[in-house]
Image: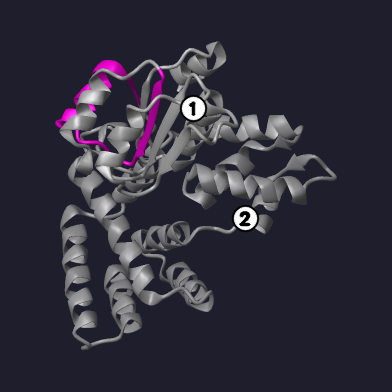
């Protein structure tokens, strides 16, 4: 990101940028900043593709001089670029005309592809990964400083937990908090609890924590709360299974530091949660629970039991 920001400040750009990774907020921010800096208000020489385009049309446009401008900009925004980029387009990427600038935004990229290698050689690849908790704290603090609002450390932790560390959600929730705390210019933990929607995944994790500690009373209260909020039992069941899979993966890698465990799309602080939870279960217990999830899903799909009955069976067995 620093290199891109420096390019924008100096108004000297690479001819191709690949923004790749799971962090949608940062990808959008970098893309918008680059588009604004390269093309400004020039809509005539800017073309944005949000799905697979006609390859021939793309190549022809790439080789067409800009109209009364020094630059032509092509933006491929989640168009699955590496699945359709032709040899002709790869040749253009290898030797990009002086007037042409290309921005590609994708969740992932196959490094074996000819197009990737061409971008690597002549452009700049920026990987925007899920942010660590320390980076999320800095992001929140910077946003608050920009608004002239103080925020308590405990409020920052609660906000990160409530949003599962998603930058888009954090940004949206901060806007609500700024409006809510407009008078006092200070955000505390209670403000976050009162204003921010606690994500379903976080509620489910709290229930799993209670299950791990064999606190049946708390686990059932949390389950009743989820049902009262009209959360679909099948959705809760799927989230529970995913979280137990994460806990099992960490348990099976207990000798490895949590930050070293490769879990794509999972924030490091969530991996840390998994590691803490793994202390409450044996590996055999986790494997048995995952087998139970598989069996329960089959019984739900074949109509043998309802999704709610299936979920309650799993909670009961996990607490036993």
Q: Secondary structure at mark 1?
A: loop
Q: Is residue 24 above or below residue 288?
A: above
Up the image or down, 305 lies above or below 68; here it is below
Question: In the picture, residue 197 is in which quadrant?
Answer: bottom right
Q: Nearer the viewer, residue 200 or 211?
A: 200
Residue at image x 31%, y 53%?
280
Label 1 CA crowd tier, 10 Å (few <14, some 14–19, many 20+):
few
Q: Dot 2: within a 10 Å radius of its alpha carbon, few (fewer than 14), some, or many (20 or more) residues? A: many
Q: How many marks?
A: 2
Q: Is residue 118 magenta?
A: yes
Task: Tell me whether the residue at label 1 lies in contact with that at label 2, contact meaning CB atoms closer than 8 angstroms.
Answer: no
Span colored in magenta: 99-125
Q: Is residue 266 above or below residue 29?
A: below
- CA distance separating discs 1 and 2: 48 Å
Q: Position of residue 66 (x, y in %)?
A: 45, 26
Residue 196's disc is: 2
Image position, residue 175 (x, y; %) = 67, 46
Secondary element at image label 2: loop
Sequence-wise, the earlier of marks 1 and 2 is 1
Closer to the camera, 201 or 222? 201
Query: Which label sits on residue 67?
Result: 1
Is residue 263 visible from the viewing direction of this image? no
Pick the residue in front: 315 or 234: 234
Task: Look at the picture and state if 157 lies above or below 63.
Answer: below
Q: Can you say which quadrant of the picture contains the N terminus? A: top left
* For residue 32, side relative to residue 90 (left or right): right
Q: Residue at x 33, y 72 (%)?
A: 315
Q: Nearer the viewer, residue 193 or 13?
A: 13
Quarter of the C terminus within the rendering: bottom left
């Amino acid at each position: 990101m620093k290199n891109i920001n420096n390019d924008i400040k100096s108004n000297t750009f690479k001819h191709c940028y690949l923004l790749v990774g799971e962090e949608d907020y940062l990808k959008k921010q970098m893309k918008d900043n680059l588009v604004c800096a390269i093309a400004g208000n020039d809509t005539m020489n800017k073309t944005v593709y949000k799905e697979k385009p006609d390859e021939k049309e793309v190549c022809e446009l790439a080789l067409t001089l800009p109209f009364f401008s020094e630059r032509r900009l092509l933006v491929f925004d989640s168009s699955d670029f590496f699945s359709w980029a032709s040899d002709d387009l790869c040749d253009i990427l290898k030797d990009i005309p002086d007037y042409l600038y290309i921005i590609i935004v994708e969740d992932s990229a196959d490094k074996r592809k000819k197009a990737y290698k061409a971008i690597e050689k002549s452009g700049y690849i920026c990987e925007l990964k899920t942010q660590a908790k320390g980076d999320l704290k800095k992001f929140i603090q910077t946003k608050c400083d920009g608004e002239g609002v103080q925020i308590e450390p405990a409020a920052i932790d609660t906000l990160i937990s409530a949003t599962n560390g998603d930058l888009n959600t954090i940004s949206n929730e901060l806007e609500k908090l700024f409006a809510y705390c407009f008078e006092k210019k200070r955000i505390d933990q209670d403000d976050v609890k009162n204003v921010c929607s606690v994500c379903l995944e976080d509620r489910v994790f709290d229930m799993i924590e209670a299950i791990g500690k064999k606190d049946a009373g708390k686990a059932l209260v949390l389950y009743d709360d989820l049902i009262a909020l009209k959360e679909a039992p099948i959705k809760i069941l799927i989230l529970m299974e995913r979280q137990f899979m994460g806990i099992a993966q960490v348990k099976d890698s207990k000798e490895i530091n949590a930050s070293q465990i490769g879990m794509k799309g999972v924030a490091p602080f969530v991996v840390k949660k998994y590691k803490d939870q793994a202390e409450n279960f044996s590996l055999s217990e986790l494997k048995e629970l995952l087998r139970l999830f598989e069996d329960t899903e089959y019984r739900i799909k074949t109509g043998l039991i309802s999704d709610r009955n299936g979920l309650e069976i799993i909670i009961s067995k996990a607490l036993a």
